[in-house]
Image (tube, grey):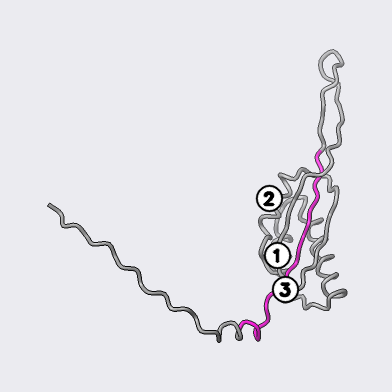
Amino acid sequence: MTEVTAHLRSYRQAPRKVRLVADLVRGKSVAAALVTLDTVVKRVSAPMKKLLMSAVANAEHNHKLERNTLFIKEITVDQGQILKRSMPRARGVPFPIHKHTSHISLVLGEKASKAANEAVSEQPATVKKPRAKAPVKAAK
């Protein structure tokens, strides 16, 4: 099975906010993820859609994979570099401001084809014996 990866580094938004959208698309097919990203009202939805389309283009061009067989196998959002700034507060004392960045990693997987699924289903399944039920105590 072929895996295709794409990365978005140093995206200028906090990872905590980006993970909200990443959790929505994790495990979905490419078509379902694109619909979800179009309807989500979050700032990260546009860059994440662009990242997904880049991964799909890589899969089609470099690995000759079909778009309708791809799904989001793994998506991780890690903390990037923190930009440290300051703002003057009372009596001109500098107050720290942390501007967070995120690293987004996307892995596309390929769903198994129907022929492979049929070959797996033809193998004999192991038969499990039903569990014996515990005896019921009589009420007094």
Residue 112 part of the magenta segment: yes
Distance, label 2 to label 3, CA atoms, is 24 Å
Q: Position of residue 5 (x, y in %)?
A: 80, 63
Of tags 2 and 3, the one toward the viewer is 3
Mark linked to residue 136: none
Residue at 72 percent across and 46 percent down: it is 17
Write down the residue under mark 2. Answer: 20
Distance, label 2 to label 1, CA atoms, is 17 Å
- Kindly identify the amino acid type of the residue bearing the numbered disc 2: Leu
Give SS at disc 3. strand
Q: Who comes first in sequence, dot 2 or dot 1? A: 2
Q: Position of residue 67 (x, y in %)?
A: 77, 75
Residue at 73 percent across and 69 percent down: it is 109
Range covered by the magenta-colored residues: 100-117
Query: Would you say the residues marked 3 and 1 are in contact, meaning their CB atoms lie under 8 Å apart?
Result: no
Pick the quarter of the image with the N terminus: bottom right
- Kindly identify the amino acid type of the residue bearing the numbered disc 3: Glu
Write down the residue under mark 1. Answer: 73
Distance, label 3 to label 1, CA atoms, is 8 Å
Q: Who comes first in sequence, dot 3 or dot 1? A: 1
- Kindly identify the amino acid type of the residue bearing the numbered disc 1: Lys
Determine whether 86 is above or below 3 in the image. Answer: above
Residue 31 part of the magenta segment: no
Q: Who comes first in sequence, dot 2 or dot 3? A: 2
